[in-house]
Every structure is written in C-alpha cells, then in structure tokens.
Image (spheres, rainbow, N blue to C red):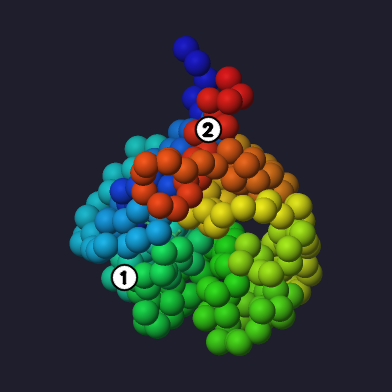
Amino acid sequence: MMSSPPVVLSIAGSDCSAGAGIQADLKSFHTLDTYGLTVVSGVVAETPNKVVSWEAMPAKLVREQLECLLESYPVAAIKTGLLFSPEIVQCVAQTLKGKEIPLIIDPVGSASAGASFGGETFLTSLSEQLFPLAALITPNLREAQALAGLDSDDQAELGSQLAHQFGVNVLVKGGHHDDPTRSIDLLTDPNGRSHEFCLPRLTGPDYHGTGCTLSASIAAYIARGTPLKDAIMQAKSFLHQAISAGHHWESGPTGEHLDALNLFNRNS
Ligand code: PXL
C-alpha cells in the first residue's frame, strides 16, 4: 500500500471557470502531493473577467460538510477562501473552535473581476469570529486597507496594525502594488516582527486566482510539516511558477488562466 498523503481542507466558493476558488485550491493541493478535501461555501457563475451571479450555500449544509470531513479524515491544515455570508463565517468558527488545526484565512471579499460578495458586516464577522482561530491571514492590499480602516498602501503599516489589532500573523500581499520589478509579500507577527518575501515580478497579465493559489499552497506545505515562514516562501515560489505557466485560449473566455496542474504535467 502507498503511504497516505497529508490531508488539506479548503472551505471556499466554487469558481465554475476553475481558475480561482475551490477548483484552484484542489489543483494546488493535488500538484503538491497532498489529498485535498473541499467544503463548498457557495457558487459563483463567472469567467476570469466577468461575474454573472453568485449564491451562498445554506450555513447548515456548510456545517454538515465540515463536520463529516473532520470526523473522518486526519485534516492537517485548513484554508478558507470566499465564505459569502456572516452566517457561514459563524458556523465555520463554531465548528473549528478548539480543533487546533492550522488555519490559513484568505479574507476574500470580492472577485478579481470586481463583484463584491459580503459587505461590511461580513468583514466584521470574519475578523471577530474567525481571525482568533487563524495561524495566518493573507489579505491583499485592498483587503488589508478595508480590515485596518486605513487608506494607506504601505504594507508595513497595514501589517503591523492588523497583526496588533487581531493578535494574528498577517501576510500583506503586494500583488497589486506598483513596484514594477519586485513582488513583495510582508509577514508581520503579533509582536510586530516582520519578514519580507521577495521574488522578481513577472510582467504580463493579471491572473485571476493568484490569491487562492497562494493560500492553498501555504496550507498544503503546512500540512506537509513545513514551518510557517518556509511554507510561505515555497508557496510564493510555487505561485510564481504557476503564473509563468499561465495561458489563455485564443477563442475562449477573455482573461488569463492560472492553472497549477500545468506544473504537474510539465514536471512529470
Ligand atoms: O479570487 C478570489 C475568488 C475566490 N473565490 C471564488 C472566486 C474568486 C474570484 O473570482 O470566484 C469562488
């Protein structure tokens, strides 16, 4: 018998175009030799540049998916993506409380294509109920500004305020920042210590699903036993490779497609 792979769980929304959301997470988990489980929190009808409509899952069904997986699998790390509603945030927080499974929270409030999902009460419930359980939160600049209530694009200022305010490790991503040469993500811990993760910036289109792929791959590395800082660096490098392998179809949806499975196919 083969040895069992580490188990990682994504609690996130379905992106039917499969470049972001739970589909992207599952591809990253698979490519990184982990076994991915999925709790679907809602469904978005979309392509990389267009959100048509979306609907949250009933909170009861989210709870039941989560409970039956946690009862049956040795879940070694969890990531959350788009959670859609304060009710879902609450039921995820209640179910995960006391479980001590490393939790990576991607505080997604909107799609790259622009649609906003949760509103202000959503961010409040996320920060009040779920952040206290997190090993790491991974806001982009826009999400960090909204969470901190600050109109700054200084990653260090945002990171130290959020880490202090919520008592949690914060990775403020610089993906949408305008440094043309470098992509910098900044980790700040609740004691104010910080660490910079830097790679050359890839020129080219804005891919949809980069945030999902980063937080999913951090969770996968953590499930494999990698310490947090190394997990972030390796996940950033994994995302960098996935972006390099991105593509679009000549006669398909407009917008670019990030697909971690491309790496798996190329490397094997
Ligand atoms: O990229 C953020 C994101 C997360 N989750 C789902 C999404 C998107 C963006 O489109 O659809 C389900």
What residue lies at 58% left-to-right and 20% top-to-bottom? 268
Q: Residues within 10 Å of mark 1 (few under 14, many from 20)?
A: many
Q: Position of residue 43 (x, y in %)?
A: 27, 56
Q: How many marks?
A: 2
Q: Quadrant of residue 9?
A: top left
Question: For the residue labelled by badge 2, is the local secondary structure a helix, a strand or a loop?
Answer: helix
> Observer-nearest residue: 25 or 124?
25
Quarter of image, ligand 1 = bottom left
Q: Which residue in the protein does label 2 denote?
A: 262
Dot 2 and dot 1 residues touching (CB under 8 Å)? no
Q: Which mark is residue 85?
A: 1
Q: Position of residue 183 (x, y in %)?
A: 71, 59
Report the side of 56 relative to 204 (left or right): left
Which residue is farthest top? 1
Is residue 207 positioned above or below 35 on the image? below
| Residue drawn at point x = 52 percent, y = 81 percent | 146
Looking at the picture, does residue 220 appear above or below residue 126?
Answer: above
- The percent coordinates of residue 81 (x first, y second) are 44, 58
Q: Quadrant of residue 177?
A: bottom right
Q: Residues within 10 Å of mark 2 (few under 14, many from 20)?
A: some
Which-is-in-front pick, marks 2 and 1? 2
Relative horizontal placement of residue 19, taking residue 45 as reference (left or right): right
Q: Identify the mark nearer the N-term, 2 or 1.
A: 1
Looking at numbered disc 1 in the image, what kind of residue is underneath it?
Ser
Q: Secondary structure at mark 1?
A: loop
Query: At 61% from the left edge and 87% from the top edge, which residue is drawn?
Result: 151
